[in-house]
Each structure stands twice: as structure tokens, then as C-alpha cells.
Image: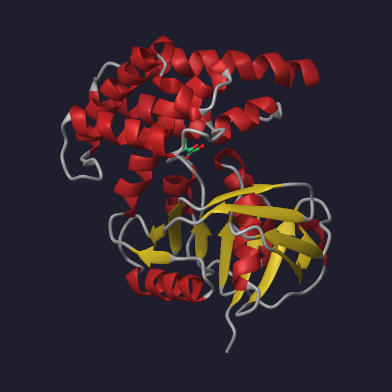
Amino acid sequence: MMTSHWILGPGAIGRLLAHSLSPLAAVTLIGRRALPGQQTLTTPEGERRGQRLNTLTVAQLGADAHEAPDFVHITTKAMAAEAALESIASVIPPSTPLVLWQNGFLAQPRITQSWPGPVLCATTTQGAYLTGDGNVVHAGRGPTFMGDLNNQHDALAEALAQSLSQAGFSATAVNDIRSRLWQKLAVNAAINPLVALHRVRNGELRDPAYAGRVEAVVQEVAAIMQAEGVPSPSGGHDEEAWQALVWQVVQNTANNKASMLQDVEAKRPTERGAILGPLIESAQHHGLPCEVLQTLDAEIAALEASYLNAAR
Ligand code: KPL
């Protein structure tokens, strides 16, 4: 039998998932506002593929009866995940498995604690962006890892990873998703706020004008990771390993406009709360220094306020 997937949050990753899963599974793409059913995907090779997707608004979901989905993927930004879940919680059984695709480490522990059913978390390096409401560009392929924070749903993670991989969305079930989410958060904390503040591409962080501050962030982050029991992806706890990781990502993504810079340019709220928030909270909990992170957080907060308040 075909599995059914609801995808809540029609951003770039949500649409990429919908396009990938559609031929093999029953997919419903859900947004707050109506979306065109005809959608196109531009592949990393530049081929444009049109596909009719089943799209619904949250209001339509509430108004009609629907068969319960096998999985609900939440693909909103980190700070919108809990509200998105709340908006559909009354129309799905509480045993429904959720898959959280957010950056950072904010929504994941909270929803894992509050949702009665299984909660899987996913972290992906797929590169994708939207060009208008009907087209997603799949800019680069990358692996996806998934699992649950308490390692209680390994078989479910395995089954979903297999379905995604069959659909061409390469995914692997892992039993260390917590560490992987923190590792991504560590990299995001060192890169995203600084490129957003200075409006530069990732590679420009190598400029001596910014490099010292990157290193100062990583120094605080490395100590926090050690206190959280999160090793660097190469296995060690030493600061050098974290410095090396961050500079490697800067090099690999030198031409990227990081997601936080895109948010600032589009005058949207940023994910600072989900990226810097858990680090600062952890540092305070463990009695570690976090002045560099706090200053960055305050600077991003002020920048955000300057355009969000102006728009009110
Ligand atoms: O994940 C990223 C982001 O933009 O959020 C990095 C790794 C910084 C690449 O741009």
C-alpha cells in the first residue's frame, strides 16, 4: 500500500520532498495560503520537471474530513514549527509520526516532549531554493540523516529513510541524531549570524576582517559542545576539530548566501532563537563563557527589529 505523507510548510525543502515522494507515495503539500497545484522542479542538472501536486490550505484541512496520514513532515522555519503543528493537531490522530526538518535545537526537544506519537528529527544538506510560488530549484544533492532523540523509533526511522532513498532523496537512519543536530547548529552559529550582519557570502568570512570573530565564536561553541557531550564529526572534543570543521564548511559553501542572510535580505524573522538560543542557554546552564554569542545574538536581534518594526 502507498504510504501517505503530509508536508506542512511549502518552503524549498518541503517542495523538494513533495516532488521526490510524489510518484511513489500519496503526498499533500499544506500551507497557510493557497498554492498552485502545478509545480515544477529544476534538477541540479538544470532539467525542469513539471508535476501536479495535491495542495491544501490549513483551513481546508480543518473544514473537510481526511484520511489520517502515515507521516506529517513539518518543514517550516524553526520558530514556526510549534504553531504549524498546533494548527493541524486537531485533525490528525495523536499517534501520527511527525518528522521535524528544522535547523537548530529548539522545536525538536519541545515537540518530542509534548507530542504523544513518535517524533523523528531530520537534518539535511540538500541545497534548494524557491523561484516564485510554483518552482523549486534543487541546487545541490546532499545526504539526509534521521532518527529520534530518545532512540525509541529506530525501525520507523529506517522505514522512512528507505522510502526517501527510493524516491531519490538519499536518507540514512542514525542513532545519534541529537549530536548531528548540535553539530549543524555549531556550524550555523559560526557562519550564519556573521554573514547576515555583514551581508557577505560564506567564503568572505575568510577575510581577516571577519575571521577572528568566527574563531572567537567557535572557541565558545567548542566548550559548550564538550559540556553537552557532543563530539565533532571527526570524533574529538578539541577546539581545533571544530575550527577545522567550520572552515571546511566555509570553503565548501564559499559561494552560498546562508539562510540567515536570505532571511535578513527578505526582511523575515531569522532563526537566531533556534541557533544561538540553545547555545547561550547551555553555556549559562554549564557556567561557561558566552559573551561572543550573546553579542552576536543582540546584534542580530537589533537588525531584525530595525526592519520588522519598520514594517508594522
Ligand atoms: O546551513 C547553512 C545555512 O545557510 O543555513 C550553511 C552551512 C551555513 C551553508 O550556507
Residue 37: horizontal and vertical position, in percent? 82, 65
Left or right: where 40 falls relative to 164: right
Taking the spot 52% from the left edge, 34% from the top edge, the residue there is 255
Residue 59: horizontal and vertical position, in percent? 81, 57
Can residue 265 be spotted in the picture? yes
- Quarter residue 89 falls in: bottom right
Taking the spot 57% from the left edge, 33% from the top edge, the residue there is 257
Camera-side residue: 111 or 157? Answer: 157
Most extreme residue toward the bottom, as rendered?
1
**By what rule are the colours in the image chosen?**
secondary structure
Camera-side residue: 242 or 55? Answer: 242
Against 111, residue 310 (above or below) is above
Left or right: where 6 falls relative to 33: left
Taking the spot 43% from the left edge, 21% from the top edge, the residue there is 205
Against 164, residue 234 (above or below) is above
Against 297, residue 240 (above or below) is below
Against 235, residue 141 (above or below) is below
Quadrant containing the N terminus in the rendered view? bottom right
Residue 18: horizontal and vertical position, in percent? 64, 65
Camera-side residue: 229 or 203? Answer: 203
Quadrant containing the C terminus in the rendered view? top right
Residue 169: horizontal and vertical position, in percent? 51, 66
Taking the spot 34% from the left edge, 54% from the top edge, the residue there is 177
Can residue 9 be spotted in the picture? no
- Quarter residue 216 falls in: top left
Left or right: where 66 falls relative to 219: right
